[in-house]
Image (cartoon, helix red, strand yellow):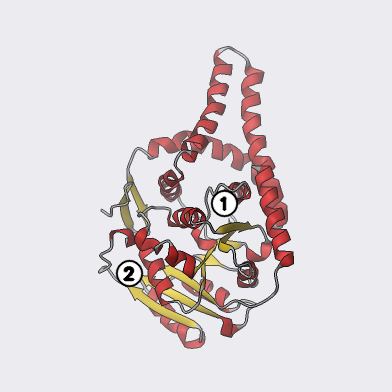
Amino acid sequence: MLAGSILENYKVGKLRKTLGDDKQSVSVIVPARNEENVIEECIESIANSNYPKDKFEIIAVNDRSTDNTQEKLDLLKKHIPNLKVFQVDENINHSNLKGKQGALNYGIKQSQNDLILFTDADCVVPPDWIQIISQLYNSPNIGLVSSYTMVEGSKLFDKIQSLEWILLCAMASAGIGFGIPLGCYGNNLSVRKKNYEEIGGYESLKFTTNEDLSLLLNIHRAGHSVHYVCDIGSCIKTKPVHSFSDYISQHKRWSFGGLELGWIAPMFVITTLSIWVGFLFSLIIGNIPLAIGFLILRLLGDAVILFQPLFKLKQHKLIKYMPIALVFFMLFELILPIFLLDPKITWKDQTFKRNGKKN
Protein backbone atom coordinates (compact mmCIF):
# COMPACT_ATOMS: atom_id res chain seq x y z
CA MET A 1 0.00 0.00 0.00
CA LEU A 2 2.79 2.42 0.85
CA ALA A 3 4.42 1.88 -2.55
CA GLY A 4 1.13 2.50 -4.35
CA SER A 5 0.47 5.69 -2.42
CA ILE A 6 3.97 7.00 -3.12
CA LEU A 7 3.56 6.10 -6.79
CA GLU A 8 0.25 7.95 -7.06
CA ASN A 9 1.69 11.03 -5.33
CA TYR A 10 4.59 10.97 -7.80
CA LYS A 11 2.25 10.67 -10.80
CA VAL A 12 0.06 13.54 -9.64
CA GLY A 13 3.04 15.74 -8.76
CA LYS A 14 4.64 15.15 -12.15
CA LEU A 15 1.33 15.83 -13.93
CA ARG A 16 0.73 19.09 -12.08
CA LYS A 17 4.15 20.39 -13.12
CA THR A 18 3.36 19.86 -16.80
CA LEU A 19 -0.10 21.43 -16.81
CA GLY A 20 -0.90 25.05 -17.46
CA ASP A 21 -2.89 27.34 -15.19
CA ASP A 22 -5.89 27.73 -17.47
CA LYS A 23 -9.01 28.32 -15.40
CA GLN A 24 -11.74 25.76 -16.04
CA SER A 25 -15.40 26.69 -15.68
CA VAL A 26 -16.59 24.75 -12.64
CA SER A 27 -19.86 23.72 -11.03
CA VAL A 28 -19.66 22.79 -7.34
CA ILE A 29 -22.58 20.61 -6.25
CA VAL A 30 -23.64 20.38 -2.61
CA PRO A 31 -26.46 17.96 -1.74
CA ALA A 32 -28.08 18.82 1.59
CA ARG A 33 -30.60 16.91 3.70
CA ASN A 34 -31.45 18.41 7.10
CA GLU A 35 -28.21 20.38 7.33
CA GLU A 36 -29.43 23.64 8.86
CA ASN A 37 -26.59 23.70 11.40
CA VAL A 38 -23.73 23.33 8.93
CA ILE A 39 -24.88 24.41 5.47
CA GLU A 40 -23.93 28.07 5.93
CA GLU A 41 -20.30 27.32 6.84
CA CYS A 42 -19.99 24.97 3.88
CA ILE A 43 -21.41 27.33 1.26
CA GLU A 44 -19.44 30.29 2.60
CA SER A 45 -16.18 28.32 2.38
CA ILE A 46 -16.84 27.52 -1.27
CA ALA A 47 -17.89 31.09 -2.06
CA ASN A 48 -14.61 32.37 -0.54
CA SER A 49 -12.46 30.19 -2.79
CA ASN A 50 -9.34 31.65 -4.39
CA TYR A 51 -10.86 31.23 -7.84
CA PRO A 52 -12.40 33.75 -10.25
CA LYS A 53 -16.01 34.23 -9.21
CA ASP A 54 -17.16 34.25 -12.82
CA LYS A 55 -15.56 30.84 -13.37
CA PHE A 56 -17.57 28.79 -10.89
CA GLU A 57 -21.12 28.30 -9.74
CA ILE A 58 -22.36 26.70 -6.54
CA ILE A 59 -25.37 24.41 -6.88
CA ALA A 60 -27.02 23.54 -3.57
CA VAL A 61 -29.65 20.80 -3.81
CA ASN A 62 -32.08 20.63 -0.91
CA ASP A 63 -32.80 16.92 -0.67
CA ARG A 64 -36.27 16.81 0.98
CA SER A 65 -35.13 18.50 4.17
CA THR A 66 -37.63 18.77 7.01
CA ASP A 67 -35.68 21.40 8.95
CA ASN A 68 -34.65 24.97 8.06
CA THR A 69 -32.07 24.03 5.42
CA GLN A 70 -34.09 25.72 2.66
CA GLU A 71 -34.46 28.93 4.65
CA LYS A 72 -30.71 29.03 5.30
CA LEU A 73 -29.99 28.53 1.60
CA ASP A 74 -32.42 31.28 0.61
CA LEU A 75 -30.61 33.70 2.92
CA LEU A 76 -27.21 32.69 1.54
CA LYS A 77 -28.43 33.20 -1.99
CA LYS A 78 -29.08 36.89 -1.27
CA HIS A 79 -25.38 37.71 -0.87
CA ILE A 80 -23.70 34.98 -2.93
CA PRO A 81 -24.45 35.78 -6.59
CA ASN A 82 -23.08 32.51 -8.00
CA LEU A 83 -25.13 30.33 -5.65
CA LYS A 84 -28.07 28.49 -7.21
CA VAL A 85 -30.57 26.66 -5.00
CA PHE A 86 -32.77 23.77 -6.11
CA GLN A 87 -35.07 21.31 -4.38
CA VAL A 88 -35.88 17.68 -5.04
CA ASP A 89 -38.98 16.03 -3.63
CA GLU A 90 -40.40 12.61 -2.94
CA ASN A 91 -41.68 12.32 -6.51
CA ILE A 92 -38.39 10.91 -7.81
CA ASN A 93 -39.71 7.64 -9.24
CA HIS A 94 -36.44 6.24 -10.59
CA SER A 95 -35.31 3.29 -8.47
CA ASN A 96 -31.62 4.18 -8.93
CA LEU A 97 -32.10 7.74 -7.69
CA LYS A 98 -33.41 7.13 -4.20
CA GLY A 99 -31.28 8.85 -1.61
CA LYS A 100 -28.22 10.97 -2.28
CA GLN A 101 -27.88 9.80 -5.89
CA GLY A 102 -31.08 11.60 -6.78
CA ALA A 103 -29.86 14.92 -5.39
CA LEU A 104 -26.48 14.59 -7.09
CA ASN A 105 -28.00 13.64 -10.43
CA TYR A 106 -30.41 16.55 -10.25
CA GLY A 107 -27.60 18.97 -9.45
CA ILE A 108 -25.50 17.72 -12.35
CA LYS A 109 -28.42 18.22 -14.73
CA GLN A 110 -28.78 21.83 -13.57
CA SER A 111 -25.05 22.56 -13.92
CA GLN A 112 -23.80 24.86 -16.67
CA ASN A 113 -20.22 23.61 -16.82
CA ASP A 114 -18.42 20.44 -17.86
CA LEU A 115 -16.24 20.20 -14.75
CA ILE A 116 -18.23 19.06 -11.71
CA LEU A 117 -16.89 19.15 -8.14
CA PHE A 118 -18.78 17.52 -5.27
CA THR A 119 -18.71 18.14 -1.56
CA ASP A 120 -21.14 17.55 1.30
CA ALA A 121 -23.03 20.09 3.37
CA ASP A 122 -21.17 19.14 6.55
CA CYS A 123 -17.80 19.92 5.00
CA VAL A 124 -15.54 22.96 4.76
CA VAL A 125 -13.33 23.34 1.70
CA PRO A 126 -9.93 25.10 1.74
CA PRO A 127 -9.50 28.28 -0.37
CA ASP A 128 -7.35 26.56 -3.03
CA TRP A 129 -9.55 23.47 -3.41
CA ILE A 130 -11.16 24.44 -6.72
CA GLN A 131 -7.87 25.65 -8.16
CA ILE A 132 -5.90 22.50 -7.32
CA ILE A 133 -8.56 20.04 -8.45
CA SER A 134 -9.56 21.88 -11.61
CA GLN A 135 -5.96 22.29 -12.81
CA LEU A 136 -5.64 18.54 -13.28
CA TYR A 137 -8.46 18.67 -15.82
CA ASN A 138 -6.23 20.66 -18.13
CA SER A 139 -5.11 17.16 -19.06
CA PRO A 140 -7.76 15.92 -21.54
CA ASN A 141 -7.41 12.29 -20.41
CA ILE A 142 -8.52 12.94 -16.84
CA GLY A 143 -12.05 11.73 -16.14
CA LEU A 144 -12.22 11.80 -12.34
CA VAL A 145 -10.15 13.23 -9.49
CA SER A 146 -10.52 12.65 -5.77
CA SER A 147 -8.64 14.07 -2.82
CA TYR A 148 -8.24 13.59 0.92
CA THR A 149 -10.77 14.27 3.65
CA MET A 150 -10.08 14.54 7.36
CA VAL A 151 -12.34 14.96 10.37
CA GLU A 152 -12.21 18.08 12.51
CA GLY A 153 -12.89 17.94 16.21
CA SER A 154 -11.18 18.09 19.60
CA LYS A 155 -12.41 14.84 21.20
CA LEU A 156 -10.41 11.63 21.18
CA PHE A 157 -13.09 9.89 19.10
CA ASP A 158 -12.82 12.74 16.56
CA LYS A 159 -9.04 12.25 16.31
CA ILE A 160 -9.52 8.51 15.79
CA GLN A 161 -11.99 9.17 12.98
CA SER A 162 -9.65 11.67 11.34
CA LEU A 163 -6.83 9.13 11.33
CA GLU A 164 -9.18 6.54 9.87
CA TRP A 165 -10.32 8.80 7.05
CA ILE A 166 -6.71 9.67 6.19
CA LEU A 167 -5.72 5.99 6.32
CA LEU A 168 -8.58 4.96 4.03
CA CYS A 169 -7.75 7.80 1.63
CA ALA A 170 -4.13 6.64 1.55
CA MET A 171 -5.23 3.09 0.76
CA ALA A 172 -7.56 4.37 -1.96
CA SER A 173 -4.72 6.45 -3.38
CA ALA A 174 -2.48 3.37 -3.37
CA GLY A 175 -5.05 1.41 -5.34
CA ILE A 176 -5.24 4.11 -8.00
CA GLY A 177 -1.45 4.26 -8.08
CA PHE A 178 -1.44 0.58 -9.06
CA GLY A 179 -4.33 1.06 -11.50
CA ILE A 180 -6.88 -0.71 -9.26
CA PRO A 181 -9.47 1.77 -7.90
CA LEU A 182 -10.48 0.81 -4.37
CA GLY A 183 -12.50 3.78 -3.20
CA CYS A 184 -12.93 7.50 -2.72
CA TYR A 185 -15.12 9.87 -0.75
CA GLY A 186 -18.00 11.72 -2.37
CA ASN A 187 -17.37 14.79 -0.24
CA ASN A 188 -14.14 15.43 -2.15
CA LEU A 189 -14.73 14.20 -5.66
CA SER A 190 -14.84 15.62 -9.18
CA VAL A 191 -15.78 14.38 -12.64
CA ARG A 192 -16.20 15.63 -16.17
CA LYS A 193 -19.89 16.04 -16.94
CA LYS A 194 -19.47 14.53 -20.40
CA ASN A 195 -17.85 11.44 -18.90
CA TYR A 196 -20.63 11.19 -16.32
CA GLU A 197 -23.20 11.34 -19.10
CA GLU A 198 -21.19 8.89 -21.19
CA ILE A 199 -21.66 6.15 -18.56
CA GLY A 200 -25.34 7.04 -18.19
CA GLY A 201 -25.01 8.80 -14.85
CA TYR A 202 -26.63 7.57 -11.66
CA GLU A 203 -29.81 6.79 -13.59
CA SER A 204 -27.95 3.96 -15.32
CA LEU A 205 -25.72 2.87 -12.45
CA LYS A 206 -27.04 0.26 -10.04
CA PHE A 207 -28.21 1.77 -6.76
CA THR A 208 -25.61 1.45 -4.02
CA THR A 209 -25.03 2.84 -0.56
CA ASN A 210 -21.59 3.97 -1.76
CA GLU A 211 -22.39 6.03 -4.83
CA ASP A 212 -18.93 7.65 -4.98
CA LEU A 213 -17.21 4.27 -5.37
CA SER A 214 -19.69 3.28 -8.06
CA LEU A 215 -18.92 6.44 -10.02
CA LEU A 216 -15.16 5.92 -9.65
CA LEU A 217 -15.30 2.31 -10.86
CA ASN A 218 -17.48 3.09 -13.86
CA ILE A 219 -15.45 6.09 -14.99
CA HIS A 220 -12.30 3.94 -14.76
CA ARG A 221 -13.95 1.05 -16.63
CA ALA A 222 -14.88 3.50 -19.39
CA GLY A 223 -11.16 4.03 -20.01
CA HIS A 224 -10.67 7.45 -18.43
CA SER A 225 -7.73 8.34 -16.18
CA VAL A 226 -8.47 8.80 -12.48
CA HIS A 227 -6.20 10.35 -9.86
CA TYR A 228 -6.01 10.91 -6.10
CA VAL A 229 -4.47 14.16 -4.85
CA CYS A 230 -2.67 14.41 -1.51
CA ASP A 231 -2.30 18.13 -0.85
CA ILE A 232 -3.22 20.23 2.19
CA GLY A 233 -4.70 22.76 -0.24
CA SER A 234 -7.27 20.28 -1.51
CA CYS A 235 -7.94 18.38 1.73
CA ILE A 236 -11.49 18.91 2.92
CA LYS A 237 -12.59 18.92 6.56
CA THR A 238 -15.77 17.11 7.56
CA LYS A 239 -17.69 16.75 10.80
CA PRO A 240 -17.27 13.61 12.92
CA VAL A 241 -20.05 11.23 13.84
CA HIS A 242 -20.73 11.72 17.54
CA SER A 243 -22.11 8.36 18.64
CA PHE A 244 -20.89 4.81 18.28
CA SER A 245 -24.22 3.77 16.74
CA ASP A 246 -23.79 6.40 14.00
CA TYR A 247 -20.23 5.18 13.50
CA ILE A 248 -21.51 1.63 13.01
CA SER A 249 -24.18 2.83 10.57
CA GLN A 250 -21.56 4.74 8.59
CA HIS A 251 -19.32 1.68 8.31
CA LYS A 252 -22.20 -0.58 7.36
CA ARG A 253 -22.95 1.77 4.47
CA TRP A 254 -19.31 1.75 3.38
CA SER A 255 -19.02 -2.02 3.73
CA PHE A 256 -22.14 -2.87 1.74
CA GLY A 257 -21.18 -0.37 -0.95
CA GLY A 258 -17.69 -1.89 -1.08
CA LEU A 259 -19.16 -5.16 -2.36
CA GLU A 260 -19.12 -3.53 -5.79
CA LEU A 261 -15.36 -4.12 -5.81
CA GLY A 262 -16.11 -7.75 -6.66
CA TRP A 263 -13.30 -10.21 -5.90
CA ILE A 264 -11.19 -7.46 -4.33
CA ALA A 265 -13.62 -7.00 -1.43
CA PRO A 266 -13.14 -10.48 0.09
CA MET A 267 -9.37 -10.10 -0.27
CA PHE A 268 -9.45 -7.37 2.37
CA VAL A 269 -11.43 -9.68 4.66
CA ILE A 270 -9.04 -12.58 4.06
CA THR A 271 -6.00 -10.40 4.74
CA THR A 272 -7.43 -9.16 8.03
CA LEU A 273 -8.67 -12.62 8.98
CA SER A 274 -5.26 -14.16 8.36
CA ILE A 275 -3.70 -11.89 10.98
CA TRP A 276 -6.24 -12.92 13.59
CA VAL A 277 -6.00 -16.61 12.65
CA GLY A 278 -2.24 -16.42 13.05
CA PHE A 279 -2.67 -14.66 16.40
CA LEU A 280 -5.13 -17.26 17.73
CA PHE A 281 -3.09 -20.20 16.45
CA SER A 282 -0.01 -18.79 18.17
CA LEU A 283 -1.93 -18.56 21.44
CA ILE A 284 -3.19 -22.13 21.06
CA ILE A 285 0.32 -23.52 20.62
CA GLY A 286 1.54 -21.34 23.47
CA ASN A 287 3.85 -19.15 21.40
CA ILE A 288 3.12 -15.78 22.99
CA PRO A 289 5.97 -13.88 21.22
CA LEU A 290 4.64 -15.05 17.83
CA ALA A 291 1.10 -13.98 18.78
CA ILE A 292 2.35 -10.53 19.73
CA GLY A 293 4.33 -10.45 16.50
CA PHE A 294 1.18 -10.88 14.42
CA LEU A 295 -0.48 -7.94 16.16
CA ILE A 296 2.61 -5.76 15.82
CA LEU A 297 2.80 -6.65 12.12
CA ARG A 298 -0.70 -5.38 11.57
CA LEU A 299 -0.19 -2.22 13.63
CA LEU A 300 3.06 -1.38 11.87
CA GLY A 301 1.47 -1.98 8.48
CA ASP A 302 -1.20 0.66 9.08
CA ALA A 303 1.27 3.03 10.76
CA VAL A 304 3.65 2.95 7.80
CA ILE A 305 0.80 3.78 5.41
CA LEU A 306 -0.30 6.70 7.60
CA PHE A 307 2.97 8.53 8.10
CA GLN A 308 3.39 9.90 4.56
CA PRO A 309 -0.06 11.56 4.21
CA LEU A 310 0.06 12.85 7.79
CA PHE A 311 3.18 14.84 6.99
CA LYS A 312 2.06 15.91 3.51
CA LEU A 313 -1.21 17.16 4.99
CA LYS A 314 0.64 18.77 7.92
CA GLN A 315 -1.25 16.66 10.45
CA HIS A 316 1.76 15.37 12.37
CA LYS A 317 0.01 16.31 15.63
CA LEU A 318 -2.27 13.33 15.07
CA ILE A 319 0.68 10.93 15.37
CA LYS A 320 0.35 10.78 19.16
CA TYR A 321 -3.16 9.39 18.76
CA MET A 322 -2.05 6.62 16.39
CA PRO A 323 -1.41 3.83 18.94
CA ILE A 324 -4.91 3.95 20.42
CA ALA A 325 -6.51 4.55 17.01
CA LEU A 326 -4.79 1.59 15.34
CA VAL A 327 -5.78 -0.72 18.18
CA PHE A 328 -9.35 0.60 17.95
CA PHE A 329 -9.46 -0.16 14.20
CA MET A 330 -8.29 -3.73 14.81
CA LEU A 331 -10.89 -4.39 17.49
CA PHE A 332 -13.68 -2.76 15.51
CA GLU A 333 -12.91 -5.04 12.56
CA LEU A 334 -13.71 -7.99 14.81
CA ILE A 335 -17.21 -6.81 15.73
CA LEU A 336 -18.24 -5.13 12.45
CA PRO A 337 -19.26 -8.45 10.78
CA ILE A 338 -21.85 -8.92 13.54
CA PHE A 339 -23.58 -5.67 12.57
CA LEU A 340 -23.39 -6.52 8.87
CA LEU A 341 -25.82 -9.39 9.50
CA ASP A 342 -28.55 -6.75 9.66
CA PRO A 343 -29.29 -5.79 6.01
CA LYS A 344 -30.78 -2.42 6.93
CA ILE A 345 -28.75 0.78 6.58
CA THR A 346 -29.76 4.16 7.97
CA TRP A 347 -28.52 7.35 6.32
CA LYS A 348 -29.86 10.88 6.84
CA ASP A 349 -33.07 9.61 8.45
CA GLN A 350 -33.63 7.21 5.57
CA THR A 351 -33.49 3.44 5.83
CA PHE A 352 -32.30 1.27 2.97
CA LYS A 353 -31.87 -2.44 2.59
CA ARG A 354 -28.60 -4.00 1.55
CA ASN A 355 -29.96 -4.50 -1.99
CA GLY A 356 -30.56 -0.77 -2.27
CA LYS A 357 -34.34 -0.79 -1.89
CA LYS A 358 -35.74 1.88 0.35
CA ASN A 359 -37.90 0.76 3.26
The answer to whether residue 99 shows anywhere in this view is no
Residue that appears at 51% across and 84% down: 82
The answer to whether residue 5 shows anywhere in this view is yes
Q: In the rendered view, would you say 344 is above or below 37?
A: above
Residue that appears at 56% across and 67% down: 124
**Image coordinates for residue 20, horizontal then vertical, percent:** 70, 73
Q: In the rendered view, would you say 274 is above or below 102?
A: above
What residue is disc 2 on? Answer: 64
Q: What kind of element bears circle 2? A: loop
Q: Quadrant of residue 291?
A: top right
Q: What kind of element bears circle 1? A: helix
Contact check, label 1 and label 2, Cβ < 8 Å: no
On-image quarter of the N terminus: top right
What residue is disc 1 on? Answer: 165
Instruction: Identify residue type, mark 2.
Output: Arg
Of mark 1 and mark 2, the one earlier in the sequence is 2
> Which label is found at residue 266?
none
Q: In the rendered view, would you say 154 is above or below 60?
A: above
**Image coordinates for residue 108, horizontal then vertical, percent:** 43, 71
Instruction: Identify residue type, mark 1.
Output: Trp
